Amino acid sequence: MYTLSLAVEIIVSILLIIVVLMQASKGGGLAGSLGGSNLGTTFGVRRTSDFLTRTTTILATIFVVLALFINLVVLPKGEKVQESVIQSSPQPTSLPPVSQPAATPPAQNK
């Protein structure tokens, strides 16, 4: 389920990128180089703009809804608690403290 949802999300994101780049901006955008000029002659300039705007809105909505669906429904709920590497390592055995030999004062020469 997760893999299918993720694949659909990737396809929607690629389509959204393409549609956004096809829209004509003040500088002309990539609409002319990606075939936007052919779309303008087919649909008319006004209808092409409306079509691309509507498609962008629909794809963006699908993208956000699908992202929320994946996050809230498909992903695991975090029921498993993982221990860290430090917690899972065996605890060191406590050794008795090493006794230090008593310090003897240095011998005094007479």
Image: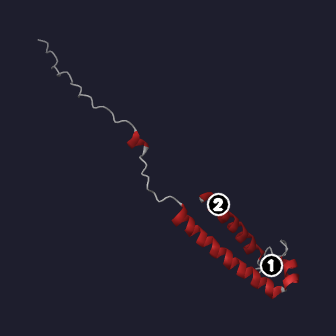
Q: Residue at x 40, y 38 (%)?
A: 89
Residue 81 location, x and y as percent?
42, 51
User: Residue 73: where, in percent of width, then height?
Assistant: 53, 65
Q: Residue furthest front?
A: 1
Residue type at numbered disc 2? Leu
Which residue lies under the disc numbered 2?
Answer: 4
Q: Nearer the viewer, residue 32 or 55?
A: 55
Identify the image's colour scheme: rainbow, by chain, secondary structure or one colour. secondary structure
Image check: 3 left or right of 49? Answer: left
Q: Residue at x 67, y 64 (%)?
A: 8
Where is residue 39? Give x, y as percent.
Answer: 85, 79
Which element type, helix, strand or loop, lies under badge 2? helix
Q: Residues within 10 Å of mark 2 (few under 14, many from 20)?
A: few
Q: CA distance from mark 1 to mark 2?
A: 36 Å
Which quarter of the picture shows residue 102?
Answer: top left
Q: Quadrant of residue 3?
A: bottom right
Depth check: 106 or 20 in front? Answer: 20
Which amino acid type is shown beneath numbered disc 1? Gly
In which image quadrant can residue 55 be found?
bottom right
- State which mark lies toward you, 1 or 2: 2
Q: Is residue 85 left or right of residue 49?
A: left
Q: Which residue is mark 1?
A: 28
